[in-house]
Image (cartoon, rainbow, N blue to C red):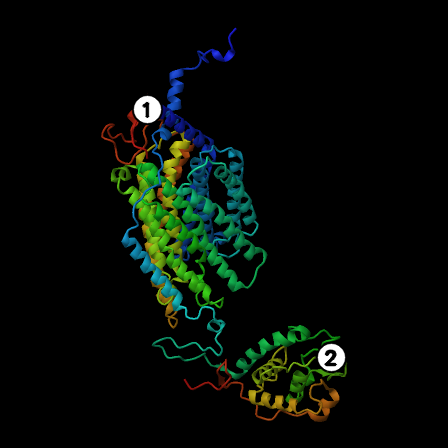
């Protein structure tokens, strides 16, 4: 008795030479391949080194051209003013009418300082935050209005109601900002005073505020009525005057 | 003695044939669907490019707005074609070089289908207006985890094959493959988590996005293409790689330089000041690894001009390496902060550079690899040398036009943009003729790739020639020129000794 695998595995149904040819053909592409060898000992040509060296120098130049790479001040330059393009006269920013220029400043301050309580429509909420729309104090005497913004307010307001305590907003506020925010509130949200509080007037307001008897505390309606029901010193500006929108100085004649 | 060698080389050939057979369907799946996405991407690219010079072209269809069709063009090119071609090469080359059969073809095929599903859904997302707006990452944010999982399933087998390889020498291609397989998930996860999961300052997000694009080119597509080129050059010519030390220099300089590149696109933006300068310097330095690899590969191949003339894989691969040299030169030339960088930051040049990298360099090397791999995994020879020649010529003419035009046209456009006192119309007018040329060139490339896709699909259906002789680009004197290659050799010709291709 022979082991089963000693018999040749031949069946009539298999054409051996055909099957062999197929196997050879399937492996033909592999059989004709070369072997991969990577042990070449070719020298690195001097020209390649020179070219790479030149590129290395260029890259070094790129890095060095940046100057002080880790300096904060190189990116955030204080008082940076864009240099005029070579060959072109720097005409500066396009002048704007005074009202629009001050309103643009004021809009930024409003959204940063006032929006949170008085709301984007300045109507407040009726209980803790009073409305500025049509408010007698906002649209009335400028000194009273400026004292409220700079020092905050407690106690009853112009409509005799008592709302929440308004915190002072004057800390760190520049005269341009105060002038902007006052002009913005008096000419927006349905208020139509049509006048422009100038930077000079705002500067005077800040001085008056600093000279108050109880400086540092919020103003009250009593104090306002006693001492501040008057216009700020200085003349209003013609809203049509052309100004530089950034510095708010009168625009140079073109 | 001689018969022993013959025997061992026969067994070796059988082992290689076994590896090829085990990878037939994964490799052909990636290549064929990649080629299909390439054609789709080019159609989208033609529409996008046509809109640059004729804004009213197809303007009635919101799905084909420039802002949607251009990102879908780029994303289909990268994730549809680029990655799938790279997957095919990675799994085949790693299996061959580690001498291990693929045991996870089913997993790879499943993951490949998931990847394709991701690309399809992503493109629908972009075209329906739900793109993220971050260049090269426009697919809606649900796509990237899908890609990551599919990628892991596809390459995990290659990692294992490398780990359990027979002891011995690690070949140059394996360095590059392994590096690409590790670098890609690093880059991909970093950029996507930073941009999708923990969004920080938008300016820095733009910087990370610019780094991601540069890193995909330099840390994934470049090493994969170089791995294929370092394999094909000695394999087809039968010569040793020209210089081992040059290969080492090229690899390590790439590894050290490439991760720094990318943020030069944000020159002048208030992000940490050194980042754009380091990015510009690193991109300039990309020339070094590029030129090291190029010299090495060209010195290996060009000493056998007759093989280069006849082998389709070598012809495509060498064109790709020429593209690499151009890419290295463009990297130097376009990134000089004082002069050219401001002109290329916001113009067509960036696109030209990317297309040169993805198509002019990477894709050509991939085509070369495809022409080498497919006859092996299908057991059939390419049907027609004429189809290969059409693919080559139209692709070359097309890509030279697209890249040259985008690079130079971009500089012209940049000059127009720098004239800030002139209306923007000036920059558009300067770019107009270049945009027309780009459209025409993309049409050429589309023509060539439709034939490529058909040829490849026929090969996958195993309708290739049954022959012992390769399809070469020049006819062999012994066999006479048949219209479709050496048809006289079909069957029964015995084991031939034609040169490998």
Question: Is the residue marked by circle 1 packed among few (<14), some (14-19), or many (20+) residues within 10 Å?
Answer: few
Residue drawn at (41%, 77%), measured in percent from left and top?
A83
| Residue B37 in sight from this viewpoint | no
Q: Are marks 1 and 2 in contact (CB under 8 Å)?
A: no
Tell me the SS state at disc 1. Answer: helix
Q: Chain of mark 2?
A: A
Disc 2 element: loop
Nearer to us in this view, B218 or A94: B218
Alpha carbons under labels 1 and 2: distance apart: 103 Å
Coordinates of residue A47 in the picture (x, y in percent): 27, 54
Chain designation of label 1:
B
Which residue is identified by label 1? Answer: B2
Q: Is residue B99 above or below residue A59?
A: above
Which residue is most to the left? B477
Look at 32% across and 55% down and name the residue there: B404
Which residue carries the number 2 mark?
A165
The reply to whether label 1 and label 2 mark residues of one chain is no
Judge depth for marks 1 and 2 and give the one in front. 1
């Amino acid at each position: 008795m022979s082991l089963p695998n000693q018999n040749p595995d031949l069946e009539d149904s298999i054409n051996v030479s055909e099957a062999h040819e197929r196997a050879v053909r399937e492996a033909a592409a592999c059989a004709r391949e070369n072997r991969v060898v990577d042990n070449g000992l070719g020298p690195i040509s001097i020209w390649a080194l020179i070219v790479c060296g030149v590129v290395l120098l260029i890259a070094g130049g790129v890095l060095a051209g940046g100057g002080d790479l880790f300096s904060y001040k190189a990116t955030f330059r204080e008082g940076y003013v864009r240099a005029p393009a070579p060959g072109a006269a720097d005409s500066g920013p396009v002048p704007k009418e005074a009202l629009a220029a001050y309103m643009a400043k004021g809009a930024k301050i409003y959204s940063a300082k006032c929006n949170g309580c008085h709301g984007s429509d300045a109507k407040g909420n009726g209980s803790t935050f009073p409305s500025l729309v049509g408010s007698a104090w906002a649209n009335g005497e400028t000194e009273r209005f400026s004292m409220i913004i700079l020092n905050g307010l407690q106690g009853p307001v112009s409509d005799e109601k008592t709302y929440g305590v308004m915190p002072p907003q004057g800390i760190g506020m520049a005269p341009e900002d105060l002038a902007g925010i006052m002009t913005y509130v008096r000419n927006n949200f349905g208020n139509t005073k049509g006048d422009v509080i100038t930077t000079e007037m705002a500067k005077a307001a800040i001085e008056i505020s600093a000279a108050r008897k109880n400086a540092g505390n919020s103003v009250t309606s009593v104090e306002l009525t006693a001492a501040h029901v008057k216009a700020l010193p200085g003349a209003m500006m013609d809203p049509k005057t052309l100004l530089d929108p950034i510095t708010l100085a009168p625009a140079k004649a073109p | 003695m001689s018969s022993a060698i013959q025997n061992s080389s026969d067994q070796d050939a059988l082992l290689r044939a076994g590896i090829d057979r085990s990878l037939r369907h994964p490799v052909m799946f990636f290549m064929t669907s990649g080629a299909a996405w390439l054609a789709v991407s080019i159609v989208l690219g033609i529409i996008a490019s046509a809109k640059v010079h004729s804004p009213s072209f197809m303007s009635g269809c919101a799905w084909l707005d420039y802002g949607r069709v251009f990102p879908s063009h780029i994303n289909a090119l990268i994730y549809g074609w680029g990655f799938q071609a790279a997957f095919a090469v990675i799994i085949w080359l790693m299996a061959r070089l580690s001498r291990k059969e693929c045991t996870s073809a089913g997993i790879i095929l499943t993951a490949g289908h998931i990847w394709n599903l991701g690309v399809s859904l992503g493109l629908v997302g972009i075209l329906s207006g739900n793109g993220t707006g971050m260049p090269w990452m426009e697919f809606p944010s649900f796509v990237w985890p899908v890609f990551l999982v599919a990628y892991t399933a596809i390459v995990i087998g290659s990692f294992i094959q490398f780990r359990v390889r027979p002891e011995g020498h690690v070949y140059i291609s394996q360095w590059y493959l392994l590096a690409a397989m590790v670098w890609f998930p690093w880059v991909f996860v970093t950029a996507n988590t930073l941009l999708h999961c923990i969004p920080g300052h938008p300016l820095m997000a733009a910087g990370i996005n610019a780094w991601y694009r540069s890193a995909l080119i330099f840390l994934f597509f470049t090493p994969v293409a170089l791995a294929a080129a370092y394999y094909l050059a000695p394999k087809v010519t039968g010569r040793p790689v020209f210089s081992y030390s040059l290969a080492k220099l090229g690899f390590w300089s790439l590894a050290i330089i490439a991760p720094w590149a990318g943020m030069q696109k944000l020159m002048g933006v208030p992000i940490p000041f050194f980042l754009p300068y380091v990015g510009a310097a690193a991109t300039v330095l990309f020339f070094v690894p590029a030129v090291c690899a190029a010299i090495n590969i060209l010195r290996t191949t060009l000493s056998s001009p007759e093989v280069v003339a006849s082998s389709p894989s070598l012809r495509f691969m060498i064109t790709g390496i020429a593209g690499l040299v151009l890419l290295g030169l463009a990297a130097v030339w376009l990134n000089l902060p004082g002069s050219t960088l401001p002109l290329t930051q916001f113009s067509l040049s960036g696109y030209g550079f990317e297309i040169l990298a993805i198509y002019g360099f990477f894709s050509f090397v991939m085509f070369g690899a495809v022409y080498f791999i497919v006859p092996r995994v299908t057991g059939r020879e390419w049907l027609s040398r004429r189809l290969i020649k059409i693919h080559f010529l139209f692709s070359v003419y097309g890509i030279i036009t697209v890249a040259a035009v985008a690079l130079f046209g971009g500089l012209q456009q940049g000059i127009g943009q720098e004239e800030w006192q002139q209306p923007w119309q000036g920059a558009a007018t300067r770019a107009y003729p270049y945009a027309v040329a780009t459209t025409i060139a993309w049409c050429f490339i589309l023509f060539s790739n439709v034939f490529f896709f058909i040829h490849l699909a026929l090969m996958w259906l195993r309708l290739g020639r049954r022959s012992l002789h390769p399809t070469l680009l020049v006819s062999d004197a012994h066999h006479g020129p048949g219209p479709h290659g050496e048809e006289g050799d079909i069957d029964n010709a015995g084991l031939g000794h034609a040169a490998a291709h």
